[in-house]
Amino acid sequence: MTAAENAEEARAYDPREIQDKWQERWARIEPFRADDDPDDPRERFYLVDMFPYPSGDLHMGHAEAYAIGDAMARYWFLRGKNVLHPIGWDAFGLPAENAAIRRNSHPADWTFANIETQAASFRRYAVSFDWTRRLATCEPDYYRWNQWLFLRFYERGLAYRKGGYVNWCPKDQTVLANEQVVAGRCERCGTEVIRRVLTQWYFKITEYADRLLADAKALEGNWPDRVLTMQRNWIGRSAGAQVHFTVEGRDEPVTVYTTRPDTLYGATFFVVAADSALAADLVTSGQRPQFEAYLERVQKLTDIERQSTDREKTGVFLGVHAVNPVNGERIPVWAADYVLPDYGTGAIMAVPAHDQRDLDFARKFGLPVRIVVATDLPDPAQTGTATPGDGVLVNSGPLDGLSKVEGIKRIIEILGERGLGEAATSYRLRDWLLSRQRFWGTPIPIIHCPSCGEVPVPEDQLPVLLPDLRGADLSPKGVSPLAAATDWVNVSCPKCGGAAKRDTDTMDTFVDSSWYMFRYTSPGYDGGPFREADVDRWAPVDLYVGGVEHAILHLLYARFFTKVMQDMGLLKFGEPFTRLLNQGQVINGGKAMSKSLGNGVDLGEQIDRFGVDAIRLTMIFASPPEDDIDWADVNPEAMVKFLGRVRRIAADVAAAGAPGGAAPAGADVAAGDVAAGDRALRRATHHAIDEVTRQVESHHLNVAVARLMELVTATRRAIDSGPGAADPAVREAAEALTVMISLFAPYTAEECWTDLGRAAADGPQASVGRAPWPAADPALLVQESVTCVVQVNGKVRDRLDVSPAITEDELRELALATPGVSRALPDPASIKRVIVRAPKLVNIVVA
RNA sequence: GCCGGGAUGGUGGAAUCGGCAGACACGGACGUCUCAAAAGCGUCUGCCUGAGAGGGCGUGCGGGUUCAAGUCCCGCUCCCGGCACCA
């Protein structure tokens, strides 16, 4: 193709036509393979995009997330780093199972078909993945290490089985972790969750609560504040005291947890959670019928009903009295559902004057209210509004006259001396319930033996493979479908050899995603979850990109796993993700895209219409990465036009270069080989390089694109009405533009790079993705003249073009002589002060 | 209720340290090229006022600090997100 034809083709640029060609080329030259060679001198950079769940093809949300992550990965490649940018699939989980039930097929079929679809879409979307490392968590050589890690947790007492209240989704017929219950509903299907008593497996994340909290401090500035805040709230550490009460007719004390032990003298009754073992234990035989009737009512409530704060208080007297340990007072013991069985000790001392919930209860059942904190607020017993704040303690024996803080300190001393209580902390965080009664997950590697109890599957028998169960009924029955695979379930006990049964539950898929970022460093390794040298070389992840919806689920679990693996000596660090970038969502018309609203936008259709580059650029330019994008507000057509302008610049430069006399391809303009040419354009180019570099590093990708648009305008002007396309400064601009735009529009950038004659014939360097990032020449960043603003009383009245080196005195004099100042200031005698901030601003203050 | 975050033109958004508010786009208007259209290229586009030069107003509302406030301080309103009977 001649240069003229090339320019003609560029004029009719259709960004879609070039896609196939480059996809084939990239697959062949592999420009984005990470180098594991320890002698590679380049600095390493590890960037992970949260891996997708393989339900169907990629959608608009993926398009935004991966456009952002890819721009950052490509940037670090261009900066010459050895970048690891892997991809995998979070491939276990309920949707695969539900789809299999609907289609009467196998979850694996659906899952692997979707993975292939998504992989092809990722390649089309031109994401710079290292395709040699792809993983899927449903593959035995991955989930084997889930089982291995589970057993290591088990040995350390961090995985255990206990009975108790659990969240149960009646539709999916499975238990859910606390984190998977959103506003009282199943995170997956939206059904109201109920509570059931079941024996389940847990990870002891509560043991790490303090470390998760303390180490969050170190993430400040590198993680979004809102994620850290959400994690802190979720962990919900509170400080207070445990106080031991005696209950009449019972030998063992009953302990309560309170954050206000200073109000102990104001306790007028005692409440235990109705659905706790303690309540059933304390109730007298006379009160038992009422209690049992009440308990039955409570257990029928869904979480939503139970947690509704505006619900009227309910409860029942248990027939016994507790004794306040500090004043010997007898207070009645009630059972109520506003006290939760699994927080604190499941029992409270009620101080109705200073706690709204206790006050509501007291007023409902006519229990006494005693003020022990003096405030200037009206009597709670009259108003129904508790006074929970600070104040001087009264009616409190030795605490009288103390403040809240002093009172808490003093009462803990008193209780401690007498063995009646001690300081204590409590957490909102509960242990992570990890077992699921579903098929498509990692089998829990435990064997239940009638004589030996729980027996871990020996390591040399891992992985415990999922039985095929092809054709079996996978529909939810409340018991794992694995239980029906009798050949699989019935095994001999590894300890005693007797008949035993496998655990039939599978692991929560959040187990899979808690450590996958480390597996990428050692693809295919079969000596452990990852090779030590590899994980040391790459991890922790330098930049993690994904949605904020994982703020407390995945991100908290991954942090927990990392700390445990650090304690096991598998990792040398305690935090998995050094920096976190949350992208927003793509919505349409102000609402989340959904089938029911019929406002879904299909990514494939968008790409067919506008091409990959234009869609990527639309995603990047629409808003800062963390904000939502409303697709109704954007216009990818504008990006198609912009890409055409970019392409035409390269084509014009190439065409001008061909007949001879133009700057040679490959001349190192940035280093000063080509000093001649349009200095205004050179300054614009270097200013753009400087700006784009800084904006990209601070993740202001939308602004980086704006700066590239400015460079395009300046370059076009130089071609059309300046020195022309043959000017070396124009070539310099075109080359810098091409490299920088490759972050967002890889296809167009490759095409331009080829036009400009810069692409190597073959190998990874044949891609613009491996070109050097342009360097801004500091000499060209210095402005020849700057605009100085002249204000009178803070209002702009004139402007001056001045040298950046101008002195204050010179500038003051110039400013006072401007027409704008004379207009606004007829009488120079009225000047009170002149503030000069050379060279940018003069402010004349008049009376 | 508690804890975060936010509010800037018709729209998306920009604005290191307190120093030109509205970069860059979308949308709109007009021009140029053309037989014509499209594409391209260019000009204008916060509001009010004015023929124009210019002037007044202007970053949710009310105050304050400062020569100077989108930015800092105090008090509100509204919106978004998270948590929510956690003692």
Image (spheres, rainbow, N blue to C red):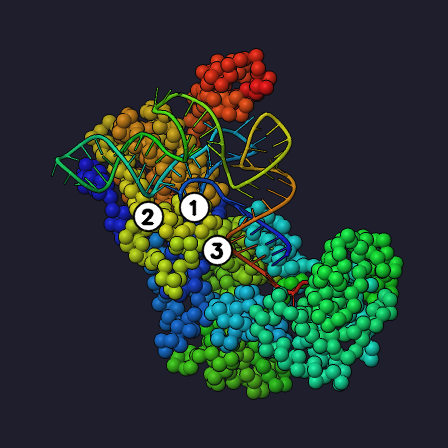
Identify the chain of the residue marked 3, using the numbered disc in the image.
A
The residue lying at 34 percent from left, 53 percent from top is A125
The answer to the question of whether label 3 and label 2 lie on touching residues, with beta carbons closer than 8 A, is no
Residue A425 appears anywhere in the view:
no
Q: Residues within 10 Å of mark 1 (few under 14, many from 20)?
A: some
A357 up-or-down from A484: above or below: above
Identify the chain of the residue marked 1, using the numbered disc in the image.
A
Q: Earlier in the sequence, mark 1 or mark 2?
A: 1
Tell me the kind of residue under disc 2.
Pro
Q: Residues within 10 Å of mark 2 (few under 14, many from 20)?
A: many
Q: Earlier in the sequence, mark 3 or mark 2?
A: 3
- Dividing the image into 4 quarters, which one contains the N terminus of chain A? top left
**Which of A680/A333 is in front?**
A333
Identify the chain of the residue marked 2, using the numbered disc in the image.
A
The location of residue A304, given as percent across then percent down, is: 57, 69
Secondary element at tag 3: strand
Residue at the bottom extreme of this rendering: A499
Tell me the kind of residue under disc 3.
Gly
Tell me the kind of residue under disc 1.
Ser
The residue under label 2 is A636
The quarter of the displayed image where residue A175 is located? bottom right
- Dividing the image into 4 quarters, which one contains the C terminus of chain A? top right
The residue under label 3 is A547
The residue lying at 80 percent from left, 60 percent from top is A371
